[in-house]
Image: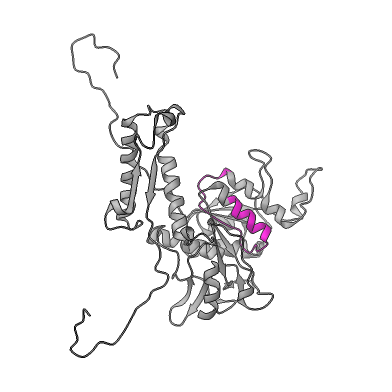
Amino acid sequence: MATSYLSPGVYVEEVDRGTKPLEMVGTSTVAFIGECGVGPVNEPVLCTNWSQFTKHFGDFQNSEYLAHSVYGFFNNGGSRAYVLNVGSMEQATKKGDKDAKKPASPAALYIGSDNGPGTRTGLKALEDVDDVNVVCAPGQTDPVIQDAVLSHCENMRYRFAILDSPEVIEKGGVDKLPKPRDSKYGSYYFPWVEVYDPFKGNIFMPPSGYMAGVYARSDGERGVHKAPANEIVRGAIGLKYNITRGEQDLLNPKGINCIREFPNRGIRVWGARTISSDASWRYINVRRLFNMVEQSIELGTQWVVFEPNDQRLWKRVTRDIGAFLLRLWRQGALFGKTPEEAFYVKCDDETNPPEVIDAGQMICEIGMCPVKPAEFVIFRIGQMPAGGDVSE
């Protein structure tokens, strides 16, 4: 504003009184981490289509799982993928560094090390990429690697892991299938899918890349609040194991999502659970919805920092976040007949007493009621007497 008015005339001043709408962040940018014989090593490369991937990392002949997984991602509806090639055990000691030590195990390639910006390796290198939402390590069933991927997603807060089951059940039936550790930031799929390879013919591939594409397709068509299940797996021509309903009765309560083939309906994703034992975070769409909302609010309210911490600021924050959640409710992401039933935003004297203000803090409480998938659809059918009242 003008500091003084000395001469008669008209003064035009700009005043910021408008809202600062929160934008929804992306939900389906995937990071693939795997081994490849060509291409840059420990450098996340953004690929937006299959041609870009082959330009950097070659085709199906140059990697065991990575190429097919990325192809399955794009084929199923994905559009943005960061590909991180961790190299191989042999390549790890051929970088021109005389002091380079050979990794103790392949898991060390994936876990990586943090030697500072630009020199991070493995999963540590993905910490430099801000817009990743989903992380896949195709074909890696080592518990150490899966634990590292889950820990990475938990530490980064807004990422979700898609993990693969072993290709072959070694001992016993499906009830002996190993499961990753408990986490609300990951999902687990069984069995492997049969796909066509132009050089080898029909082969079996881990499902994580294909599932990541299904996530992206479901997000684009319906929204992140829709469970990525009961969806066709494009490119799958068969399965390593055909799961029966009785076998899935054993797997589903454990958080093991099945891929099943149905007559006349094709091969479909038939599970939507995380690997968490916490019932509040049982479903994939609930966890990913909260990831999106939390990140959107964090990025969209950066303007609040260092603003005068008073009632006017609290009202502006309440208004902006309330408008954002209202849009979500209208899109069907929140449960409730009215906005009041679906969410609340509280930022007032009660959440910000003098001691909180004196500490330089502003606290805003937000509650949401997410929609949950109709996992068990039950129709109760009974006989009614002739001429009886339907309402009885």
Q: Pinpoint residue 248: horizontal percent, then vertical percent.
A: 53, 76
Please give left or right for residue 223 compared with residue 37 in the image. left
Kindly tell me whether residue 90 is visible in this rendering: yes
Identify which residue, 155 or 386, lies in the foreground.
Answer: 386
Q: Is residue 145 magenta?
A: yes
Q: Pinpoint residue 51: horizontal percent, then vertical percent.
A: 54, 58
Q: Quadrant of the C terminus?
A: bottom left
Residue at 31% over, 36% down? 315
Kindly tell me whether residue 201 is visible in this rendering: no
Q: Quadrant of the N terminus?
A: top left
Residue 194, picture quadrant: bottom right
Against 222, residue 132 (above or below) is above
Q: Residue extending furthest top?
A: 6
Q: Pinpoint residue 110: horizontal percent, then vertical percent.
A: 67, 53
Residue 323, picture quadrant: top left
Q: Give the magenta part as a residue range.
A: 128-152
Against 335, residue 234 (above or below) is below
Identify which residue, 231 or 329, lies in the foreground.
Answer: 329
Q: Is residue 184 magenta?
A: no
Which color scheme does this rendered protein use?
A: one colour
Residue at 75% over, 51% down? 92
